[in-house]
Image (cartoon, rainbow, N blue to C red):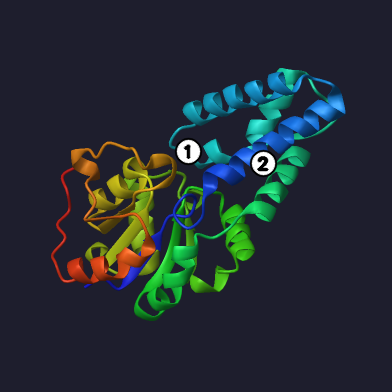
Amino acid sequence: MINTILFDMDGTIYNETDVKVKAELYIADYINKKTGVELEKVYSTFREVKKKITNELKGLPQANDRKIWFKVLLEELNVSLMTNVEMAELYWKVLYDSIVIFEDFKFVLPDLQKKYKLYILTDEMIDIARAKLRKLHIDNAFIDIISSEQVGHTKPAEELYQYATKIVGKPANQILIIGDNLAADIRGGNSAGMHTAWLQRGKYHFQRVMEKEMPEITFSNYVQLEKSIDDISNLPREEMNK
């Protein structure tokens, strides 16, 4: 019986791609206007820095720390008129002002709250995750935010899912994780013995489903979700081979 749902955040409860691009372009334009460095150079350097850092710090929460991204970016551009902290604050302000909840998620959320205990499971830094939920006006919908920052490992690390199970206080086979990324959300949930549901839309909608990333539920809009949960809720969920 499923009694708890863990929701991924970015791309699962709001469209992350558009707002992140908007924030990135704002920063590039800001640096261009303040320093005279060509806009194309700023933006292309940012993209290279972002890729490099996320690859080098893969599996670590620090890979998502914008202050690290902007520190390296300013060093690469040889810019000293501003700080990485200033850039990160501007970035998040633009994103927070632009963030919009998925309407179909907002529609089903009250019913899900009545039936299940809801949590956020995210690779985002916990203070940033809290701010996003406040901006979306759904911070009271979730019992707690569980962040990879608290564990030191990002999805699909076993340590993160074990920690989440401990925080929830329920057996893994009574927990459903919902996310948009097969390789992170679904693979981790499967390995932990949780029920899994894949939101097949957004930037990961084209992902090829691998054996260890096979979700129990695949859905493209949240109106489909509640019945799908009911259909699998009483089925046994054995831990997949790692």
Secondary structure of the residue carrying numbered label 1: loop
The disc placed on residue 60 is 1
Please tell me whether residue 204 is drawn above or below residue 172 in the rendered image. above
Foreground label between 1 and 2: 2
Say which residue appears at 24% left-offset and 66% top-offset.
228
Q: For the residue marked with disc 1, what is the amino acid?
A: Leu
Camera-side residue of 224 and 65 = 224
- Name the side, left or right, on which 182 lies relative to 14: left
Count of labels in the image: 2
Find residue 100 and report its horizontal and vertical position in percent. 58, 58
Disc 2 crowd rating (10 Å Cα; few below 14, some 14-19, many 20+) is many
- Name the side, left or right, on which 29 lies relative to 160: right
Please tell me whether residue 190 is drawn above or below residue 78 in the rendered image. below
Disc 1 crowd rating (10 Å Cα; few below 14, some 14-19, many 20+) is many
Farthest-out residue, bottom? 114
Q: For the residue marked with disc 2, what is the amino acid?
A: Ala
Find residue 177 and report its horizontal and vertical position in percent. 33, 58
Say which residue appears at 83% left-offset and 32% top-offset.
82
Say which residue appears at 60% left-offset and 46% top-offset.
19
The disc placed on residue 23 is 2
Find residue 53 and report its horizontal and vertical position in percent. 55, 28
Image quarter of the N terminus? bottom left
The answer to whether residue 156 is seen in the rendering is: no
Find residue 78 and report its horizontal and vertical position in percent. 78, 18
- Name the side, left or right, on which 82 lies relative to 161: right
The disc placed on residue 47 is none
